[in-house]
Image: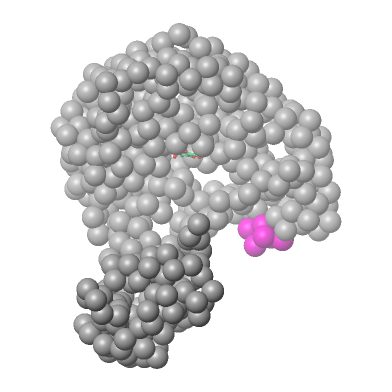
């Protein structure tokens, strides 16, 4: 039996000798019989080696004569050889977008260690993913026979878009046609499509300060002029919006990220009027409105919009799992075609079986029951976190943004902004993961209301016991000061 390994090895010896000039063009090679005996391999191995080298253009054979090194090979000095030193990157050209992306300081995706208590924002509890239900419905979706397997429509599965239309009306009072909905790979892809289709180098993008880094960095990669706008307890301060034409505004009105304020109805109307007057787009990122405790979620900007200014983004990252990479856009009618085309160019479409599972979950009522259960669980965790902060942390602490969502902001009034890295390192040393709010500000502390150290504390990924233990240990780290 011929060994593939030995064929590859012998081929490589010939290639290296030819590249090194040890075998020159036109030079005759040993007969297959002689080479097989020299190398101690079978003759059929040598025949395969020669055939392979002929197909690669290294050698030539003619009937009745011995194989020889190809005459058409480039001079050995110029021939390609694997080089140990890569060509310096500045000698190859990245696009302007590539250069900007390369220069950005993206946060490293943290790895959560098994015994660490990590107040990582964006994590959800493993038991909050409806695993068994998902598996059952996924199996059913997978077993459904199709006449053949071909790409699906870029806008996503009709079943999911239809179910979402009903869900958005029930849950958010948002009324849209199925055609306005495009399924995407998470809010991040929705933001990326908006950036690529609506922003160009020098475009004005107005963002809340502080804001969601995943959006800001995306707009910066596009070369946008990103300007921070202050937020207060009523959300974005619309009277501070400049009168610029054709800008884009990115907002999180249902739950300002990260501070947690809810945009008041008067501000919502003010923002919509400003956008219509200036021919601007508004991105409404409704990333966690399912987790509003007590009161019903507030009305969306999309449902108040009569001018077609609002691009609404939703995600399944908080209600199911961030690892699913599933979300959706609700677009003004005039943007549907271009977004559908860009989605097709990006990745053809979002994976279909996952979409069918969510459609089935919504249709059966299981999705909304699941949300109610997870909301109750997170309400308990939030209460435990606030109680633990009051019990263990120093008195001069202010907690912000507790009415909804899966995180809170904690201001440590006895510490300076510059103390944050030290606090984080001390907490890390005793197995506690905490996260500074500072990277979410783009303009230093200019528009920062609290000029003291601040933390964004996510709690959805932890159990109530871990939360209590984590805050008690965090208090130790703080007291080491
Ligand atoms: C403001 C905001 N938007 C969107 C997302 C979710 O993005 P994705 O759907 O890409 O997971 C997050 C997640 O952490 C967020 O904080």
Q: Quadrant of residue 152?
A: top left
Compared to residue 187, the image places residue 19 above or below, namely below
- Part of the protein shown in magenta: 417-423
Compared to residue 129, the image places residue 73 above or below, namely below
Q: Residue at x 69, y 22 (%)?
A: 380
Compared to residue 110, the image places residue 395 above or below, namely above
Q: Residue at x 51, y 37 (%)?
A: 323
Name the spot of residue 3 as percent of width and height, x first.
50, 61
Q: Is residue 179 magenta?
A: no
Q: Is residue 267 visible?
A: no
Q: Give the number of marks.
A: 0
Q: Is residue 102 left or right of residue 58?
A: right
Per the picture, the main secondary structure of the magenta-coloured stretch is helix
Q: Quadrant of residue 350?
A: top left
Name the spot of residue 421 as percent of width and height, x first.
67, 60
Q: Is residue 401 left or right of residue 188?
A: right
Q: Quadrant of residue 32?
A: bottom left
State the colouring used for the structure image: one colour
Q: Is residue 427 left or right of residue 242?
A: right
Name the spot of residue 47 as percent of width and height, x first.
38, 68
Name the spot of residue 91 as percent of width and height, x first.
32, 80
Q: Is residue 1 visible?
A: yes
Q: Nearer the viewer, residue 30 or 214?
A: 30
Task: Name the quadrant of the C terminus.
Answer: bottom right
Q: Residue at x 45, y 16 (%)?
A: 140
Q: Nearer the viewer, residue 333 or 74?
A: 74
């Amino acid at each position: 039996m011929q060994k593939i390994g030995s064929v590859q090895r012998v081929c490589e010896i010939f290639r290296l000798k030819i590249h090194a000039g040890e075998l020159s063009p036109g030079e005759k090679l040993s007969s297959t019989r002689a080479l097989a005996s020299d190398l101690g391999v079978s003759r059929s191995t040598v025949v395969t080696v020669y055939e392979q080298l002929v197909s690669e253009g290294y050698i030539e054979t003619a009937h009745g004569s011995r194989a020889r090194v190809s005459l058409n090979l480039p001079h050995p000095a110029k021939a390609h050889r694997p080089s140990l030193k890569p060509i310096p990157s500045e000698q190859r050209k990245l696009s302007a977008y590539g250069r900007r992306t390369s220069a950005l300081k993206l946060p490293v995706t943290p790895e959560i260690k098994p015994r660490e208590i990590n107040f990582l924002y964006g994590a959800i509890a493993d038991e909050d993913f409806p695993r068994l239900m998902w598996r059952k419905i996924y199996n059913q979706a997978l077993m459904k026979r199709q006449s053949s397997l071909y790409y699906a429509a870029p806008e996503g599965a009709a079943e999911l878009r239809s179910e979402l239309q009903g869900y958005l009306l029930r849950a958010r009072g948002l009324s849209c046609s199925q055609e306005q909905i495009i399924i995407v790979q998470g809010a991040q892809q929705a933001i990326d499509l908006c950036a690529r289709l609506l922003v160009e180098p020098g475009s004005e993008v107005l963002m809340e300060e502080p804001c969601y880094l995943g959006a800001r960095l995306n707009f910066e990669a596009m070369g946008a002029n990103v300007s921070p706008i202050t937020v207060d307890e009523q959300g974005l301060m619309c009277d501070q919006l400049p009168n610029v034409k054709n800008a884009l505004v990115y907002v999180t009105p249902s739950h300002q990220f990260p501070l947690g304020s809810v945009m008041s109805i008067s501000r919502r109307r003010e923002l919509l009027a400003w956008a219509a007057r200036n021919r601007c787009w508004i991105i409404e990122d409704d990333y966690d409105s399912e987790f509003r405790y007590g009161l019903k979620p507030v009305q969306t900007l999309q449902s108040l919009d009569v001018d077609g200014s609002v691009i609404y983004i939703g995600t399944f990252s908080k209600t199911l799992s961030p690892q699913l990479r599933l979300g959706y856009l609700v677009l003004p009618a005039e943007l549907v075609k271009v977004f559908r085309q860009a989605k097709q160019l990006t990745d053809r479409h979002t994976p279909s079986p996952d979409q069918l599972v969510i459609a089935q979950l919504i249709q059966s009522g299981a999705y909304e029951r699941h949300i109610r259960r997870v909301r109750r669980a997170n309400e308990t965790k939030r209460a435990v976190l606030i109680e633990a902060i009051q019990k263990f942390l120093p008195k001069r602490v202010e907690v912000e943004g507790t009415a909804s969502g899966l995180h809170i902001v904690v201001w440590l009034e006895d510490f300076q902004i510059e103390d944050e890295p030290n606090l984080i390192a001390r907490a890390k040393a005793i197995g506690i993961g905490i996260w500074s709010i500072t990277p979410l500000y783009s303009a230093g502390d200019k528009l920062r209301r609290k000029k003291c150290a601040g933390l964004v504390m996510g709690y959805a990924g932890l159990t109530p016991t871990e939360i209590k233990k984590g805050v008690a240990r965090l208090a130790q780290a703080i007291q080491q000061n």
